[in-house]
Image (tube, rainbow, N blue to C red):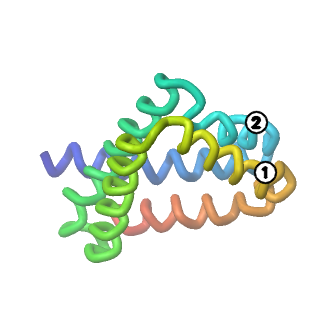
């Protein structure tokens, strides 16, 4: 189980780095993806269930990570917010995503790409 949690956590870190690249080189694509969050049942529940997988990986791998408390808090935060979003009406989640997209136009997403690189790098650093 620990090796699976490690693999999931590594994949999560790599995913965050990849998201940073998308934000940097194709910010309009990242913006369209952000604005679609919660837009359909498949997107909404698929996104939230997929988000719970790295959350569980962070929680399970926390004791072996370089930052156990941070990993545990982050994992529980991701898991808790996913459960809340599953229980709320889907249209609320979509409205929130559209509001966020309005506040974060593509040029702003491009400027935020280093944050995604840093966060993904932190996850990878803490497990490798």
Q: Residue furthest right?
A: 107
Relative to 59, 27 lies left or right: right
Residue hosting label 2: 29
Relative to 61, 41 lies left or right: right
Point 79% across, 40% down: residue: 26
Relative to 32, 121 lies left or right: left
Whole-angstrom CA distance, mark 1 to mark 2, is 14 Å
Check the picture and name the quadrant holding the N terminus.
top left
Precedes in sequence: disc 1 or disc 2: 2
Check the picture and name the quadrant holding the C terminus.
bottom left
Residue hosting label 1: 102
Toward the viewer: 115 or 65?
115
- Across and down, in percent, residue 90 comes to 49, 36
Query: Regarding mark 1 in the picture, which secondary structure is present there?
Result: helix
- Across and down, in percent, residue 110 comes to 79, 55
Relative to 128, 62 lies left or right: left
Query: Residue 26 — which label?
Result: none
The crowd level at tag 1 (other Cα within 10 Å; few <14, some 14-19, many 20+) is few
Point 71% across, 58% down: residue: 113
Point 39% across, 37% down: residue: 50
């Amino acid at each position: 189980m620990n090796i699976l949690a490690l693999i999931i956590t590594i994949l999560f870190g790599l995913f965050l780095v990849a998201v940073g690249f998308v934000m940097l080189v194709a910010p309009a694509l990242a913006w369209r993806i952000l604005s679609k969050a919660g837009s359909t049942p498949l997107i909404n529940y698929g996104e939230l269930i997929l988000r719970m997988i790295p959350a569980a990986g962070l929680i399970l791998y926390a004791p072996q990570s370089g930052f156990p408390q941070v990993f545990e808090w982050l994992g529980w935060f991701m898991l808790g917010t996913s459960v809340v979003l599953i229980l709320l009406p889907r249209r609320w989640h979509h409205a929130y995503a559209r509001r966020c997209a309005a506040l974060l136009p593509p040029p702003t997403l491009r400027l935020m790409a280093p944050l995604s690189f840093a966060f993904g790098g932190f996850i990878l650093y803490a497990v490798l």
